[in-house]
Image: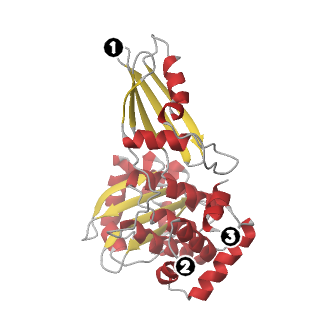
Amino acid sequence: MAALGMLLASGLDLRFYVRALPAIMRRILAVSTIGFFWSDAKGEMMDAWCENAHFLSADVVLSCQRYQEADPRNWPSFTENVMAGPVAGYLLPYQNAAFYASEHYAITYGSINARHVLDAVVHDGQRPHGCHLLMRSADLGAFSQTDAAVAADIGHLTTLAFQPGTEISASTRSLGAGLMILGMDGEIIHIDQDGHQSLWMLSRPATGGMPFGGEDRLERLADPVRQTALAMQDNAPMLQERRSSFWGDFTIQYDRTAEGRVIVRFQQDLPFEAHLARRLADGARSPRRVMVSWLLCKGLSRKEIAARLNLGQDTVNSYISEAFAAEKVRTALEFVTAVLA
């Protein structure tokens, strides 16, 4: 759960938010399909995203509207739900025999094999931001009150993603994530700062820990990408490849121009902090220790971590000692290296 909070506080834009969130949520709750709906300050829906595109189709939207308007006791409106505040499970009482017998259920949920629905409202106490919708097939069983409590925690954590001025550490990457132009012979004609940074990150292997003191000259860093560009066939003016590194996964796109130059675009699939959050979520760590570990990896001092989490400094020191002992390290730098190894 703490890793979810870390992810949401890591400065992600919504493209990465909706891509990374389901993978982490599924480690917390068993779900079949996940959706998220954004709202304006008045609680009215602005936009929506769902893993199953059917759920966002016109037929489904109209069915929802008809079902709610037929009788307010059938189903609350989106505005009524999100304005209820930071709660979860608001929809559970509406999933009764009449709901499962309705045409609306058949159109909206039955056709994607969703039997049970759990909502988690995102509300910071001043304004609503939207609502998670978690759906389960019949074989996964109904959501319990415990599930609703977990979903409420998810709703609370998600407010971190909407807080203005969220701290973005130096390790957060520009996700544009760089451009390089190569001449006909592979010489570097142009490279921007993000492209240089992407090459440096790609030079660090995905396994075996972080190699320090490696080769950082641009010409050497660019060699693997340059070799791929030179090997492109004239009849294949565009090529895409995936590469993994210590810093995460990248997509590299090569476009050959009519003049024989190759334009190379780098795209980081997840920013470093989201990559780190997912690695921490994989381990058998307590949620509080995960959160302390994450803030430590972001470069916060022990005093700053204590203030951020409203913990005593002795408690923070204890969590850090446990984390270091588990990874058999002595410093924060060794710790983040061990986590990502």
The secondary element bearing badge 3 is classed as loop
Contact (Cβ within 8 Å) of mark 2 with mark 1:
no
Q: Amino acid at mark 2?
A: Arg
- Residue at the image point whose x is 39% and y is 39% from the top: 178
Residue 2, quarter of picture: bottom right
Whether residue 76 is visible, yes or no, is: yes
Sequence-wise first label, 2 or 3: 3
Callout 1 amino acid: Glu
What amino acid is at disc 3?
Answer: Arg
Query: Where 84 falls versus 182 (above or below)?
Result: below
- Dot 3 or dot 1: first in sequence order is 1
Determine which of the numbered discs, if any, sits on residue 116 in the image: none
Instruction: In the rendered view, tell whether residue 156 sits above or below residue 113.
Output: below
Q: Is residue 281 visible?
A: no
Judging depth in this view, the residue of 33 and 174 nearest the camera is 174
Look at mark 1 in the image and give the residue it sits on: 259
Q: Nearer the viewer, residue 216 or 178?
A: 216
Q: Which mark, by number, is residue 302?
A: 2
Q: CA distance from mark 3 to mark 1?
A: 54 Å
Question: Which residue position is annotated with label 3?
Answer: 285
Taking the image as shown, residue 52 lies to the left or right of residue 72, namely right
Position in image of residue 12 (x %, y %): 42, 57
